[in-house]
Image (cartoon, grey):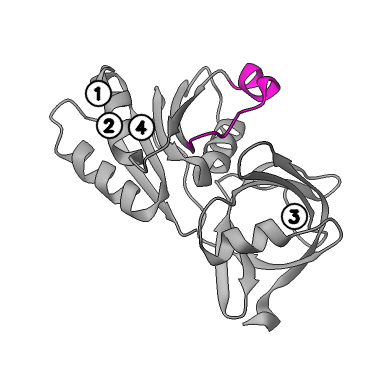
Amino acid sequence: MERMLSSGTVTSIQKWEPGTLYEIELHIPHINMKGWDSIKRLKCKVDELEYRDYTPVSWNSELNICTLLIDGGHDGAGSRWVRALKSGDPVLFGAAHAASLPSAKGPVLGLADASALGHFLALRQLTDPSEHPMEVGVIVNGGQEIPDAFTEENPEFQFIQDSQNEGADLLEQWYSGKSLADYNSIYIAGNIPMMKALKRKLKSDPRVHAKIYGHGFWS
């Protein structure tokens, strides 16, 4: 497996205090980013025989640097890996399954937990906001503060504090007051049980006529 992997280097890492989100800049010199036209994932080696998929939030194809946002607030191999990561560390990764862009123009509803924040930032970077206006609800661990600069630059995102592990229920409450028939696409991304539960509920909701995309992540 490792013979098939590429190597990158962490150029900087920053923790969003006081919570568990980590912003990582990764130099990946052997990857051509200029042709990216889907939501890419990097399958990173986080331990022996352990791999986790992470989505580049943004990327500079001239410098071959991409930015990852990783939630380190769980007791999983990926979370333990990112908490120990330091600037200058090597990262082994391969290409993981990419997620497609909306198949039709029109409003996009996003439902996510913190592990999928990068997924929706990449989706926004790859789409025209005049053709695909977005609204995204994001569950974050109780106590996680979002930098003011981030919220000002990303008004499409609404952050919902979750102190009792009620992510799916809180997101259902958030979208229940919206006119679901207005959306052409609904993207659900995050931990796999939450994603599956919300996808099942939305598919059975008679108000929903949108195409539903589901993307699950392990911690």
Q: Which residue is mark 2?
A: 172
- Read off the magenta span: 141-154
- For marks 1 and 4, give the one nearer the viewer: 1
Q: Residues within 10 Å of mark 2 (few under 14, many from 20)?
A: some
Q: Amino acid at mark 4?
A: Ser
Q: Contact (CB < 8 A) between labels 2 and 3?
A: no
Quarter where residue 113 is shown:
top left
Residue 108 on image: x %, y %: 41, 27
* Residue 176, disc: 1
- Disc 1 and disc 3: Cα gap in Å? 41 Å
Q: Is residue 36 above or below residue 88?
A: above
- For marks 3 and 4, give the one nearer the viewer: 4
- In this rendered view, identify the residue nearer to me: 83 or 172: 83
Q: Upstream in the sequence, badge 2 or badge 4?
A: 2
Q: Which residue is mark 3?
A: 32
Q: Upstream in the sequence, badge 2 or badge 3?
A: 3
Q: Residues within 10 Å of mark 4 (few under 14, many from 20)?
A: many
- Disc 1 and disc 4: Cα gap in Å? 16 Å
Q: Amino acid at mark 1?
A: Ser
Quarter where residue 78 is shown:
bottom right
Q: Amino acid at mark 3?
A: Asn
Q: Secondary structure at mark 2?
A: helix
Q: Is residue 152 magenta?
A: yes
